[in-house]
Image (tube, helix red, strand yellow):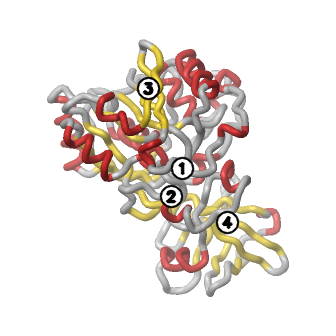
Amino acid sequence: MNVDLFDFALPAERIALRPASPRDAARMLVVTPGGVSDRHVGDLPSQLRRGDLLVFNDTRVIPAQLEGTRGDARIGATLHKREGPRRWRAFIRNGRRLRPGDAIDFGREVSAMALDRGDDGSWALEFAGDDPVELLLERAGRMPLPPYIAGKRATDARDADDYQTMFASEPGAVAAPTAALHFTPALMAALAAEGIDHATLTLHVGAGTFLPVKAEDTADHRMHAEWGRIDAATAERLNATRAAGGRLVAVGTTSLRLIESATGEDGVVRPFDGDTAIFITPGYRFRGIDGLMTNFHLPRSTLFMLVSALMGLDAMQAAYAHAIAEGYRFYSYGDASLLLP
């Protein structure tokens, strides 16, 4: 499909620079085949059914953005995907000043060697020393806010909490599964009281999630792989929910993509441990999920293509036009949508 089909105009003032407070006070646009309705995240229990299961991503964002030097050159690195105990793939700012074998000094006794450059322009970095890389990042790294926020304001102490979900327990992501940012203990209690349960899986979101689609046709776009895991007990719970007549509602496109990667043509979710580069566009037949709660996505992005595959391109173009006209806040710190096909 032509990527231009997924374009739309978004006024800059619609991009949220801070999350709603409290988190579950954010607005929520409910989209069904019957149209759209304006709600708030706190209304979620009334929009779901007893027996439904919400599926969250429990990945934890690491301070994956680093600033360093190679000689006189300033080098910026955003870690993307772990490739070994001390080796990470990273997108490099000022990478033209880098050669294989160069050492980058990130300060605070943290350094890494540039190993090779991939076809996507990213570099493999090998961190020096014996301290765990997680400890090195805590010393020298900072929270990797999305470029559409970081380009408008500096990262600050509030982001260390604001950009983590209440489910974050498995370190490894360089971007938050932002739909889950809306959830609070009070909202989870309200959901439980209505017989709506939850489960967690892990998908470590990579920086590739923010890369624009440069191809003119979706068939020519190459997705970046991300590592994910669904254990046997969780897969069994997901299957049991559907067998009992409940719906699986993914909280975030990361949860959705991993469930779909783990689900066979027979609709059975199986344990999963490995990389996924699944790219969902209109025409895709969903096998593992029955609904999606997600934030509002960028024009021409793979995620807007995904929601268009779920609800239909015309329906999502209309929903986004409504959200823009009604003042909804967009992107990572913005409002939510609940998509129930």
Residue type of the residue flagged with mark 1: Pro
Density class for disc 2 (Cα within 10 Å; few <14, some 14-19, many ≥20) is some
Local SS, label 3: strand
Location of residue 341 in the rendering, given as x and y in whole percent from the top left corner? 39, 20
The mark that comes first in sequence, 2 or 4, is 4
Secondary structure of the residue carrying numbered label 1? loop
Q: Where residue 30 is drawn, which disc sits there?
A: 3
Q: Where residue 72 sits in the image (x, y, percent)?
A: 84, 79
Q: Distance of mark 1 from mark 3, alpha carbons?
A: 19 Å
Q: Amino acid at mark 4?
A: Ala
Q: CA distance from mark 1 to mark 4?
A: 26 Å
Q: Which residue is mark 4?
A: 77
Q: Nearer the viewer, mark 2 or mark 4?
A: 2
Q: Nearer the viewer, residue 131 or 103?
A: 131
- The reply to whether callout 1 and callout 3 are in contact (CB within 8 Å) is no
Spatial CA span between label 4 and label 3: 38 Å
